[in-house]
Image (cartoon, helix red, strand yellow):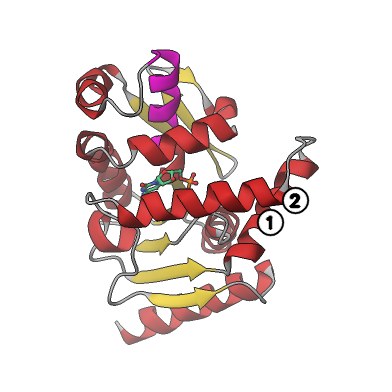
């Protein structure tokens, strides 16, 4: 069994940046579970499946084999052996990922992959239900959050840096809708595990958050 650090929280709280940094510092594997849901979303878009047809998606995704591999600390996602990593960050895929992740068969489909990675490696795994459902026995659980305006601003900056034109207002609206869907669904909704440490990143730098989590981890390991 590997050592497991679970990082959950809403979109734009800084999960992937922080989880990647913490993993690097500790020489753990960084596992981005959102990218797995994005791969399923990409599959559904390619197949022309409607997000409202949960039963059909539940059946069809049995044909969608998602696997991951790592190169220099970066996770690559494969869909039926094709590297789809570069297709997963569009707004269309983000929206569809939030829709398909509410379908229980989709969650079941990805559970074994996530749990086996954590069983076989020391991981920092980020997502929405890692501390509550996927790794309930994780050695450290963090719930990362930030106020909605800050989260939208970060996402806006990220897209502008990539040369994508967008409006901050639109991003805030889409992000709020996504949060509501992710928190309001019945299957493994986004919520803070009882034993998770809440870290609000609104006024903290990436370095400060990383240091805080590493300190919490060392503290935990000293006590166990
Ligand atoms: O972290 P992200 O933005 O890449 O996640 C994309 C979507 O996938 C998000 O809207 C919620 C969903 N998701 C989930 O339901 N459970 C996870 N463990 C990770 C992501």
Quadrant containing the N terminus in the rendered view: bottom left
At a point 38% along the width and 21% down the height, the residue shown is 44
With respect to residue 148, does 120 lie above or below? above
Q: How many marks?
A: 2
User: Is 192 on the left or on the right of 35, as rendered?
Assistant: left
* Vertical relation: 49 (above or below) 66: above
Q: Are marks 2 and 1 in contact (CB under 8 Å)?
A: yes
For numbered disc 2, what is the local secondary structure? helix
**Secondary structure beneath label 1:** helix
Mark 1 crowd level (few <14, some 14–19, many ≥20, 10 Å Cα) = some
Residue placed under numbered mark 2 in the picture:
157
What is the crowding at mark 2: few (fewer than 14 residues within 10 Å), some, or many (at least 20)? some
- The residue segment tinted magenta is 36-48
211 is within the stretch colored magenta: no
Q: Nearer the viewer, residue 190 or 22?
A: 190
Identify the residue shown where x is 23% and y is 57%: 133
Whether 214 is drawn above or below 80: the answer is: below
Q: Position of residue 125 (x, y in %)?
A: 41, 54
Relative to 145, is 63 above or below? above
Q: Which residue is mark 1?
A: 154
């Amino acid at each position: 069994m590997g050592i497991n650090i679970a990082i959950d929280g809403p979109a734009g709280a800084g999960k992937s940046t922080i989880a990647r940094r913490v993993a690097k510092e500790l020489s753990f594997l960084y596992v981005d579970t959102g990218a797995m849901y994005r791969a399923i979303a990409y599959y559904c878009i390619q197949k022309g499946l409607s997000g409202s047809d949960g039963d059909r998606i539940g059946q069809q995704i049995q044909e969608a084999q998602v696997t991951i591999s790592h190169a220099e600390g970066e996770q690559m996602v494969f869909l039926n052996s094709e590297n789809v990593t570069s297709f997963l960050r569009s707004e269309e895929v983000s929206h569809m990922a939030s829709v398909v992740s509410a379908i229980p068969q989709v969650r079941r489909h990805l559970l074994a992959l996530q749990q086996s990675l954590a069983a076989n490696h020391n991981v920092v795994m980020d997502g929405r239900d890692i501390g509550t459902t996927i790794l309930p026995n994780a050695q450290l659980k963090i719930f990362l959050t930030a106020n909605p305006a800050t989260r939208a601003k970060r996402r806006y900056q990220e897209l502008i840096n990539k040369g994508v034109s967008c409006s901050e207002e639109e991003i805030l609206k889409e992000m709020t809708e996504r949060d509501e869907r992710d928190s309001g669904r019945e299957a493994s909704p986004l919520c803070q595990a009882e034993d998770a440490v809440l870290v609000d990143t609104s006024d903290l730098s990436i370095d400060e958050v990383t240091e805080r989590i590493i300190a919490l981890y060392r503290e935990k390991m000293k006590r166990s």
